[in-house]
Image: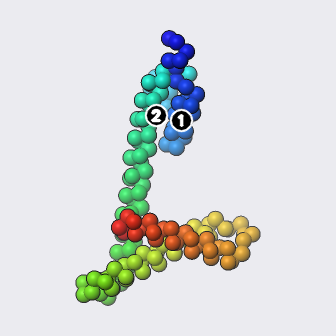
Amino acid sequence: MAMEDFATEKQKKKLFAVLHSLDRDPKEFMEDRNLSSFDKLTREQCSDLITELEAIEEQRKAKREQDIKTGLQEQISEQVPKDAELAFEEEPVNAEVARMGFVMQLCTSEAKKIADALCSNGGITEGTKAGMIQKLATTMFIEAMKRGL
């Protein structure tokens, strides 16, 4: 086999990166696939493995996003007061505003938790922390609205 038939360093690095992102141990992966060495993979074999692993990575990402969306929808429906639900039925414009208000409130609450965890060591001012919360909550709200939550 000619040297140019072996997987390139770039391909092997990509393979290791995808394995890492999937929390897969390269040695265990080699054993599972009965591979003696990544250095003996052909370009085509390495490319096929990368494609297969990236597909798994995309499936996991889609599942995580769906789980987040489902979780947010459940939290929103649990937090909507009964009289807000009545407003949803009576006036659609008010219903949308009320729903957005609850989503924003939830995003702000989650952003505060994240900021508190990130800033637990101290060393930043309350103003900086408040700005962080505002940016996180806004980003989360925009994403929630994009996803139709």
* Pointers 2 and 1 in contact (C-beta within 8 Å): yes
Residue located at (44% from left, 40% from top) = 54
Image coords of residue 76 (percent x, y): 38, 74
Graded by Cα atoms within 10 Å as few (under 14), some (14 to 19) or many (20 or more), the crowding at tag 1 reads: some
Which residue does the numbered mark 2 point to in the structure image? 50
Instruction: Determine the residue positioned at 55% across, 69% down.
Output: 136
How many marks are shown on the rendered structure? 2
Q: As shown in the figure, which amino acid type bears the numbered disc 2?
A: Ile
* Residue at 53% in and 30% down: 11
Estimate the x, y position of residue 15 in percent, counting from the top left: 52, 34
Q: Would you place residue 133 above or below residue 36 in this image?
A: below
Q: Quadrant of residue 112?
A: bottom right
Q: Answer yes or no: is residue 72 visible.
A: no
- Residue at disc 2, secondary structure: helix
**Which residue lies under the disc numbered 1?**
14
Amino acid type of the residue tagged 1 in the rendering: Lys
